[in-house]
Image (cartoon, rainbow, N blue to C red):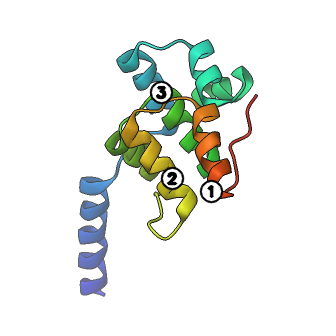
Amino acid sequence: MKQLNSNYENLSNFINNHYDYRTFGKMINHYFCKKNISTKELCENAGIDRKLVSKFVTDRKYHPSKESCMAVCIGFGLTLEESSDLLKICGYSFANNNSRDLAIVYALNLGINHVGEINELLRELGEKQFKEA
């Protein structure tokens, strides 16, 4: 029993030392400031509507889809590193064995920040495109 209590303490310490308290909503607010972009611009670039952005920011328990998260990355014009970090916060990543994800990574590396332009690339590849609001 002593070892179990000791393991619990070690586990608790490990979690406390590694837990990431950032949320998707907090990061959205952070990027609004950092990138100096309006909600309207984000919505236009990302192809999402204002109600969804509002949900991102106000509903602490909201968990976006990978699709929505990637659209936000594009809409803010995030770098690949920033995008990967935001996806990670939501439990996602860019898959190296997925041509659609790789096309999006390619576009991010080129600095493309509008889903319409990325949709052109995806269309050429025969991949699923982003919905545009």
Q: Quadrant of the image for the C terminus?
A: top right
| Label 1 environment density (alpha carbons within 10 Å; few <14, some 14–19, many ≥20) | few
Question: Foreground mark, 3 or 2?
Answer: 2
Please report the residue visible at 23 percent of the width from the left and 70 percent of the height from the top: 10
| Label 3 environment density (alpha carbons within 10 Å; few <14, some 14–19, many ≥20) | many
Q: CA distance from mark 3 to mark 2?
A: 17 Å
- Residue under circle 1? 125
Q: CA distance from mark 2 to mark 1?
A: 9 Å
Q: Amino acid at mark 3?
A: Phe
Q: Amino acid at mark 1?
A: Leu
- Residue under circle 2? 103
User: Could you say which disc has been placed on residue 43 in the image?
Assistant: none
First in residue order: circle 3 vs circle 2: 3
- Residue under circle 3? 76
Q: Judge by depth and name the residue closer to the eye, 71 or 91.
A: 71
Q: Evaluate if marks 2 and 1 touch, with contact meaning CB atoms under 8 Å apart.
A: yes
| Label 2 environment density (alpha carbons within 10 Å; few <14, some 14–19, many ≥20) | some
Query: Is residue 65 visible from the viewing direction of this image?
Result: no
User: From the viewer's perspective, is residue 26 above or below residue 62?
Assistant: above
